[in-house]
Amino acid sequence: MKTIWVLLLFFLATVIPAQVRDSLTQADSTFTILPRVHVSFPGQAQPYNRSDLVWTDYTDMRDWLMRFEGAYARDIGILRGAIGMEFFGANDRQSSLLVNGLPSQNPFTNTGLFPFVATEEVQSIDVTPQYASFWQGGNGTSSNIDVTEMNRDNPAPYSRIRHTEGPAEYLYTDALFSQNTSRNENLTLALTRSSWDGEFDTTTTDMWDLRGTYRWNVSPTGTLIFRARYSDHIVHLYGGVNPNPLTGAWADTTFSRIFAPTINTGIRSDIVRSNFETEYRLYPFGDTMNVASALVYYTSFSRWYSDRMHLAAGLQREDYVERSDVVGIAMAYQTIPAPFKIDLGAGVRYVNAYNSPNFQEFTQLQYDARGMVSLDVKLLELSAMARVERSVSGFTFGTGVGGTLHIGNGISIWTGASTSSRSPSIAEFTWSNPGDMHQKAITNEILSILEAGMTVEGTLGHARITGFHRRIEDPIRVFLYYSEPPRESRPIRIFENGKSQEATGGSASWQLIFPLAGLHLGLEGNATWVRQSGMPVQPVTPEWYGWMEFYLRTSLFNNALYLKSGFRVRAADRQIGESFDPKLEIFTPVLPGGQFAVYEYPGYTISDFFLHAKVKTALLYVVVDNIFDDNYITAVLYPMLGRNVRFGVSWEFLD
């Protein structure tokens, strides 16, 4: 069946474009495609754009985010599964994921829907500094991921297919077709199919994604964009492996798909998300110094959850649906009256969350407004920003300042500070399942962040070093508590505001390319150090973690063949305490209190190999993850994948 789908997609990507021809093949667009209102902050790391991303190996967007300093992916060993993304020790609920300026998150838990980002549509990725994360919205106060998607301009028919295969029947296929329908209009259609049979019992995944974009350059000063997308993502969440081997020495059976019995073979999560957007971008005064946008959108989110594990033990089966609808408008405006730059934004949205037995029905009109003023004079850049928002629990506020001093010779130093508040998510604020409990009412978190760093840029590349201190008052905490060993009971979820938490740390990142006898040797990576206090279990995030790549780039046969090949090393320090809650789909500590409650797992060092070869318009790639088949774990009871090989091709067709 999978082979049939691959052949069908290949047919659509190659045969149809050859039949969709008109007089446009020699015509250029009359009008310019207007860019997004793009905002940058003092101290912001360089973004990754499409030319960087196509030469990396990835299964979804989190593989790209790991290249940013401070990023850490806590994983449960499921390809394209429900995986958390943390930055500098902050949990995944304190992050926000924006796509084209709109939140792309689970509306109930505020966690990013990373598998739902269409990787083949990504033009660039920005990650804001910690101190400025509150400004763009999405209820993320410690990190903000800003994704810009492509706006294609294809006078001639263009199609592309990307296909990847991997361990346990992993299959990923993305087919795309794009062509201008007139001199100033473009239609792009795409289909993604992904599936995986799983490493352990019932850890399968299955995903469909259909999307379309219609872009119309209305005038030299206006662009209209329509987007529509439908995604269906099924994951079997197996609850982890039998914990007994973890109480003693690390037994081989813990990582064996044959001998490691799983805790739960009956959990299934099915997420369906539909999104419709209409965006208008314009130069309101006819010049590029002023750009504005208005975006009207509707998002529908549904999650079916089923847990049939404990039927034999006489416990009640859990089957339920969570639904939400969001309709809104978002506006942004940027003007550059030198030496100033002014960024303004506002939004209004109606949120309706219903049909869940876990929390009360939630309906609310939410709105926000934000502004930032930047001054750029010779060697100095200064920015001041503020934001106010009405969210789940009421109003949240944030203010911040930042600045960059360019010393010269490619060296600059920067600093930033902010105070902001994070509203509880819908689940945190209204959870009312009688099987769980709230200890007290949940109030907003209050964050204070101080950050500083230095950037060095030269002919061979660039490097950064940063340091930060973060303090959280009234942190919102969610714990899992088992009254019996996990195989005999479901956990109780405890929601509460805790005492203050503090985190201090820093990072170093680098990208260096050395020319040598017609070759290019690359050295790229980052390292992060985070020390936290006030946490219930220490250390929740590894104190040290990072990655490094060493690779070779070259061209052969009169530039007919381009190669990039090398090795990557991923490493992390010891960890204690975080587990994955399938019901909430978040990572959370397990309360101390018994041998079944707290686990410690050691640090790890993992090596990978990658090879990319581009022949004309075809990019072929082979990746060997975990070359030495090392056993490691990043979330309690969830072993990571051993050695596996992924290979595939990304092929463009121009007609």
Image (cartoon, helix red, strand yellow):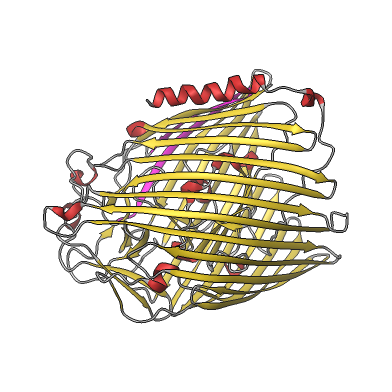
- Name the residue nearer the viewer: 88 or 1: 1
Q: Residue at x 65, y 53 (%)?
A: 46
Question: x, y (%) of residue 394?
Answer: 52, 78
Would residue 222 be seen by someone viewing this image from the given angle? yes
* Left or right of 363 in this view: 310: left
Residue 625 locus on image (x, y percent): 40, 38
Q: Position of residue 273 (x, y in %)?
A: 48, 50
At 33% from the left and 72% from the top, the residue drawn is: 432
From what the image shows, is residue 506 above or below residue 563? below
| Left or right: where 251 falls relative to 321 | left
The image quadrant that residue 590 belongs to is bottom left
Q: Percent position (x, y) of residue 548? A: 50, 46
Q: Is residue 595 above or below residue 124?
A: below
Q: Quadrant of the C terminus?
A: top right
Q: Is residue 471 above or below residue 377?
A: below
Foreground of the two, 57 or 602: 57
Residue 597: in magenta span: no
What's the magenta bit mostly, secondary-structure-wise? strand
Q: Nearer the viewer, residue 582 or 518?
A: 582
Q: Residue at x 45, y 69 (%)?
A: 362
Magenta stretch? 602-625
Q: Is 50 positioned to the left or the right of 181 in the image?
A: left
Label tally? 0
Q: Quadrant of the N terminus?
A: top left
Residue 451 visible from this viewpoint: no
